[in-house]
Amino acid sequence: MRSSSSFASDSRGNPPHSTRRPPVLSDLRSEGRKKSYSRSGVLAPDYVGERLPTISRFYGVVIRMFHNDHAPPHFHAEYAEAVAAISIERLEVIAGMLPPRALLLVLDWAELHKQELLENWELCLSKKQPNKIQPLA
């Protein structure tokens, strides 16, 4: 029987072939906030004690914005257990992931509502409630 000391570990001390996934939204978290993970191992927003305004919902996708969030202007899209941050100006994923079909829906929706998203970004920066945006029809 092999002992655990006979296995090499990576630079983080994880055993080889570890199933532990790195946080994918860690760059969106500020220091000192508790990190929470979904069952799939993807870092999810910490909903405890925070108010995350929901801007829109369509086809199982939930669109939210944090109050006073960091640059660049972006929104958070959630689908099932997947979470991604999407740049408003460039309409691309800046952190996280969504299934391809959900991502296409989100990007189509964001392209149609880009100006409204930028207005909501400004509202969130000033800690005001963002406006609801029409869902994708």
Image (tube, rainbow, N blue to C red):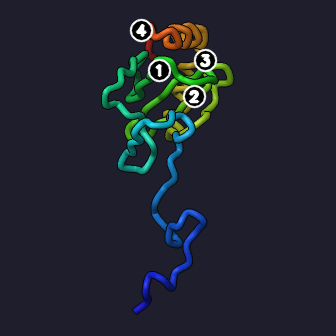
Residues at badges 1 and 2 in contact (C-beta under 8 Å)? Answer: no
| Secondary structure beneath label 2 | strand
The residue under label 1 is 65
Q: Amino acid at mark 4?
A: Gln
In the depicted view, which residue is nearer to us: 35 or 16? 35
Say whether disc 3 or disc 1 marks the residue closer to the N-terminus: 1
Left-right relation of 116 to 47:
right
Q: Earlier in the sequence, mark 3 or mark 2?
A: 2
Mark 4 highlights which residue? 129
**Contact, mark 3 vs mark 4 (Cβ under 8 Å):** no
Q: CA distance from mark 3 to mark 1?
A: 16 Å
The residue pinned by badge 2 equals 86
Sequence order check: which comes first, mark 4 or mark 2? 2
Q: CA distance from mark 1 to mark 4?
A: 10 Å
Residue drawn at (51%, 9%) of the image = 126
Amino acid carrying mark 1 in the image: Met
* Badge 2 amino acid: Ile
Query: Circle 3 sits on which residue?
Result: 111
Q: Quadrant of residue 90?
A: top right
Residue in the image at 43% along x and 15% along y: 55
Quadrant where the C terminus sits is top left
Q: CA distance from mark 3 to mark 2?
A: 11 Å
Q: Name the spot of residue 80 as percent of width and height, x first.
A: 38, 38
Q: Residue furthest left?
A: 48
SS at mark 1? loop
